[in-house]
Image (cartoon, coloured by chain):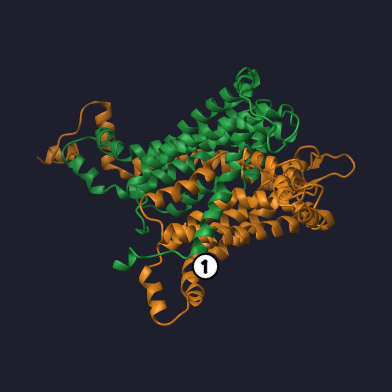
Chain colours: A orange, B green
Amino acid sequence: MTALTVGKPHSSILAGRGGFAGALSDAFWRHPKLLLLLMLAPPLLWLGIIYVGSLLALLMQSFFAIDDFSGVVSYEPTLATYGQLLTGTNLDIILRTVLMAALVTLTSAIIAFPIAYYAARYAKGRWKAFFYLGVMLPLWSSYLVKIYAWKLILAKEGIVTWIFAKLNLSFVLDAILSLPVVGGNSLSVSYLGTFLVFVYVWLPYMILPTQAALERVPRNLIEASADLGATPRQTFRTVLLPLALPGIVAGSIFTFSLTLGDYIIPQIIGSSRLFIGQAVYAQQGTAGNVPLAAAFSVVPIVIMGIYLTVAKRLGAFDAL
Amino acid sequence: MRSDQNLRSPILLKIAAAGGLLFLHLPILLIFVYAFTTEEKSYQWPPPGLTTRWLAVAWNRPDVWSALTLSVQVACIATAIALVLGTLCAAAVSQTKFFGREAISLLVILPIALPGIITGIALRSAFSLFDIPFSVWTIVLGHATFCVVVVYNNAVARFRRTSGSLIEASMDLGADGFQTFRHVILPNIGTALLAGGMLAFALSFDEVIVTTFTGGQQATLPIWMLEELIRPRQRPVTNVVAMVVVLVTFLPILAAYYLTRDGDQIAGSGK
């Protein structure tokens, strides 16, 4: 007996399995760490090497600068490229993008709330499914098709102009378009158009987390608030909104981040003034200034880093 | 809770909610009208006439077909890779506890949390650093990276609901690890994987931002569409393609919904 145990220290009550698969299965059972390692290795290698690797390679480039005369990247660490980022036009681009992202986030939160609240509180059974799919289908339908639809809508000869004309309100549209900054030749080449499309495309990302947060608000809290004499408005401000806030903040992470990095929407619908995404694209493509493009792409990462830290404090991650 | 049945929603809330939903859906419906317009040169509304002849024109365009074939190819390969990597990662994270678990969830989510342009430009500069020529595989590489998260999310949610004692019972009854996987784990997570796979397919099929950086000369369907958007050559064909894309993406979404709706979406159950 002793000899047997010494000879096969691992043998337990059952005999080991025969064959390669059996032996392998036994090995996994005896060494859970081995199994864990084998399970984690492929995804970690993939994400670690391909994704994080190239991300770091990109970020490193931002510490190089382009030589003004030869136009060649000189590989000496410098902060000059970051200095360029904070001058005139480039700073304008950053501020413009952040302002747009903030406005889009705010507007989506306002439009999303009634939908989320109705779906969370009043919709039952089939209506619930209807609301869920009503948000999911636009969320998942093609990004470019959605932008294309808005190109059709906002075109000068399109449906918006037609509606205003039918209502004899063309002068209102003209007045809006003649506004100094947000206006333009037609809606499809104005900031207003860019803004509308951003709100449209990212709105579902705001609805879903808001609805999830509202569904966790116990109904009796609202009843209690009413019983204690609060008006609906007070209940909303002091009970509902604070409890829904983590969900709204979670949604705002998406709307803010997605607006910050997008370069296709402002390129197709908007004025010729650039956003961060377009600047990155132009710098690495036609301008061939990869260090500046890399520095530009650090901006959304830093902004989102700050944003996420604040959001974490507000409990947004529990609402995702 | 009798008051529940009599719960009436304020009329203003109803209008706001209905208005919001209309805002989300009307633009997509408009595409369907434009696909049949007789107008070729502009985006004129209302359409001067309706015709079905653009369907035939679009059907006979070789460039549309080659873009479509490439998109389907890329989406299939990327989905397959994402299914393997996402499931492995989800199994490891949900079934065991180890140091750095949180970091792994973050790593998986990062490719979609950061703006797509950053993922795209990072991959592109890595490709040029190592002199990797653009091909179908460079597109797949990018797509698989951000598709992992969709599969991972679906699988993790299902693993959490699958009781660990099922696996222990299977092992106690003498099944080896592979048998347990084949007969116990797979049937339990199967529909979640199918749903995750469909969403990953839809995500890859629709992806444009990363693809513009990793695609080189090859045009997937979204790249084809983007070129038409920037420099419209034949608007009616674009209209028809847009309509078909809407119809094609709706099917996997509906299927994924019906596969995961039991349990995952119980109202008010929270987390």
Query: Which residue does the image show at 41% across and 64% down from the upper left?
Result: B8
- Residue A180 x, y percent position in the rendering: 83, 58
Query: Mark 1: few, some, or many residues within 10 Å (few <14, many ≥20)?
Result: some
The answer, for residue A79, to whether it is visible in the render is: no
The answer, for residue A12, to whether it is visible in the render is: yes
In the image, residue A194 sits, relative to residue A151, either above or below, namely below
Determine the image quadrant of residue B124: top right
Element type where label 1 sits in the image: loop
Residue type (three-letter) at the residue carrying disc 1 = Leu
Residue farthest to the bottom, as pictured: A229
Report the residue marked by disc 1: A314
Q: Looking at the image, which is closer to me, B12 or A57?
A: B12
Query: Which residue does the image show at 71% across and 52% down from the upper left?
Result: A167
- Residue A16 x, y percent position in the rendering: 19, 33
Determine the image quadrant of residue A92: bottom right
- Residue B79 x, y percent position in the rendering: 48, 33
Residue farthest to the right, as pictured: A69
Q: Report the chain holding disc 1.
A: A
Left or right: residue B224 compared with residue A248? right
> Where's the N terminus of chain A, which quadrant?
top left
Q: Looking at the image, which is closer to me, A95 or B27?
A: B27
Left or right: residue B263 compared with residue A286? left
In the image, residue A303 sits, relative to residue A57, either above or below, namely below
